[in-house]
Amino acid sequence: MKFDLHCHTNVSDGQLSPAQLLERAAAQGVTHLAITDHDTVNAYPDLDCPVGITLIPGIELSTQWRNRGVHIVGLNIDVDNPVLQTGILQQQAARAQRARKIAARLVKQGLPDVHDEALAAAGGSNVGRPHFAQALVAQALVPDISAAFKKYLGDGKVGDVRDVWPDHDVVIEWIRAAGGIAVLAHPEHYKFTRTKLCELLRDFVAAGGTGIEVISGKQEEKITRKLATLADDFGLLASVGSDFHRPGTSWSELGCCAPLPAQCQPVWSQW
Ligand code: MN
Ligand code: MN
Ligand code: MN
């Protein structure tokens, strides 16, 4: 069995369509896949799953914790649950508001207003920072996507707008209402000190969170050991995900996740 419980399609900021993603997952030998698009489950309706792949309904929700952006993955959710659906609508409104704020902040930096170009780049899917990056590149305001993030859009930069998102405990409630498991996504990504990560985990568990990504894409062995220990300490189930967005990024290829350390209790032991 090969699990990949975190990846994106072009329904959010990934490149492949849901059907193309499933095809690639099958080719990569993935047996259990969760598509976890940002704040949407629109990949799921009418999805024909190739033989050999078990699809676990999922989502990645943007939240804030102490004014820091934190992502929470919901796994094994009922995508039609009304509480979750209402939450998703709220996220979409927040995302639209965030796009306006990002555009306004870039204008303040002396750039032209790229709001409409970013929305056009999203092509009707959930607009996010990568679409603003595309808009900036298209207007030759930066040489490439990575420069756009480095200068304007990356974490802590002017275009990193987080205050529109609900608190982490609110989002955990939506996931639980939909019968799912709330998993803290890519814990290393936040660059918290160990103390701060422990504080987050304490709050996360108190709010009803029950899982943590012990494996997130290709990562160093020592990170895996650290996260496995934290999972143990906080009694959390361990999840595994590539956070795949597009082909050609070897650190986050679909299905390329190291196995969980033996001490971990996998999330899938719960379903
Ligand atoms: Mn993304
Ligand atoms: Mn994320
Ligand atoms: Mn992700």
Image (spheres, rainbow, N blue to C red):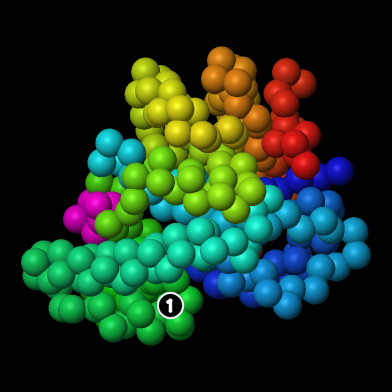
Residues shaded magenta? 157-163
Please state if 165 lies on the left or on the right of 159 as rendered: right
Tell me which secondary structure the magenta stretch mostly adopts. Answer: loop
Is 260 drawn above or below residue 93 in the view shown? above
Residue 218 position within the rendered picture, expressed as x and y whole percent measured from the top left = 62, 40
Residue 142, visible in the rendered structure:
no
The foreground one among 258 and 89 is: 89
Please state if 111 lies on the left or on the right of 80 as rendered: left
Image quadrant where one finds the C terminus: top right
Residue depicted at 38% across the width and 64% down the height:
90
What amino acid type should be assigned to the residue bearing mark 1?
A: Ala
Residue depicted at 32% across the width and 64% down the height:
94
Disc 1 element: helix
- Residue beneath disc 1: 122
For label 1, the crowd category at 10 Å Cα-Cα, with few meaning under 14, some 14 to 19 and many 20 or more, is many
Residue 48 position within the rendered picture, expressed as x and y whole percent measured from the top left = 80, 73
Image quadrant where one finds the N terminus: top right
Q: Is residue 64 magenta?
A: no
Residue 161, visible in the rendered structure:
yes
